[in-house]
Amino acid sequence: MRNTIPDIIIAIDGYSSTGKSTFAKLVAREFGFLYLDSGAMYRGVTLRAIESGFVREDNSLDEDAIIADLPALDLHFERGEGKTLLYMGARCIEEEIRTMKVSGLVSPVSAVAKVRAWVDAKLRSFSEGGRVIMDGRDIGTTVFPGAELKIFMTADPDVRARRRYDELLSKGQAPVLEEVKKNLQDRDYMDSHRETSPLRRPEDSFLLDNTHMTMHEELVWILGLIQGRFSLLDPPELSC
Ligand code: DC
């Protein structure tokens, strides 16, 4: 029996826009974990490729140039108020990495095996010391196959498209719902069918379908899971 949640690694995987990062951020805040968004790293590599001219006019990638540039690429997270922000050198790139342009190119960039190896090594080094919650597509299968708690998230595709659409709208962008939905479908397909570390549900993961769940219900769900799994005597009170 324990009093507190141990310094475990929680791996969250799942399809695009299933609310992985919102959920992970909240869990991090409630239980005092470091939150790391692995998708942001792939988005950062993609932004760099666009800005450096490694994406050709027809949207094909100069993979050799992307790979050759990796050693000079400084992507790291800094803790902001209640969130973790991605930096490229001294520049915070949280906004730039969430545009439709980056979303349209990130799946092919993340399919490059050497990009994945580079991102994996960074993610592991950022996580030294544990007490980390990380979301992505291959966290429980490849980045941390030994993670103590693995969750696989899913939700109805229309609900997911609407959530991403609302999010883009709230950030001042002018999304088109059908385009957002198509981007999600395309990414889900590419992410599940690439050769290196495709999106798969880890066998030892717990399934969370949040189509009809509130954030509070999701938190109660994971708290129950943690409590049972680690025999917590005195589970933390939820603040929301
Ligand atoms: O979580 P996100 O939508 O910001 O991720 C952007 C893309 O990055 C996603 O379409 C696939 C890729 N990705 C990945 O291949 N592996 C991860 N662990 C995280 C993201």
Image (cartoon, rainbow, N blue to C red):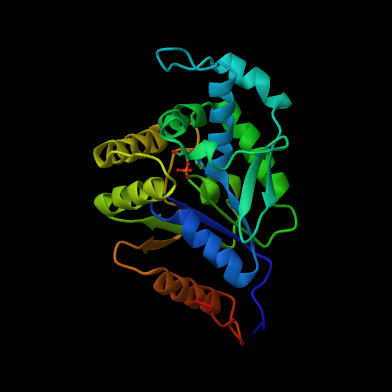
User: In which quadrant of the rendered view does residue 104 lie?
Assistant: top left
User: In which quadrant of the rendered view does residue 221 lie?
Assistant: bottom left
Q: Is residue 209 left or right of residue 56?
A: left
Q: Is residue 237 left or right of residue 125?
A: left
Q: Residue furthest right?
A: 129
Name which residue lies at 40% across and 56% down. 153
Q: How many marks?
A: 0
Q: Residue furthest top?
A: 57
> As displayed, is residue 30 above or below residue 161?
below
Depth order, front residue of 142/131 = 131
Name which residue lies at 55% across and 60% down. 25
Q: Residue furthest front?
A: 172
Q: Considering the image in quadrants, where does the N terminus appear? A: bottom right
Name which residue lies at 54% across and 78% down. 239
Measured from the top left, where is residue 175 in percent x and y?
Answer: 33, 39
User: In which quadrant of the rendered view does residue 148 lie?
Assistant: bottom right
Measured from the top left, where is residue 67 in percent x and y?
Answer: 62, 21
Q: Is residue 21 left or right of residue 182?
A: right
Measured from the top left, where is residue 146 in percent x and y?
Answer: 60, 55
Name which residue lies at 58% across and 30% down. 45
Depth order, front residue of 180/229 = 180
Residue 207 seen in the current view: yes
Depth order, front residue of 54/13 = 54
Measured from the top left, where is residue 137 in percent x and y?
Answer: 47, 45
Q: Is residue 143 left or right of residue 103?
A: right
> As displayed, is residue 18 above or below residue 107?
below
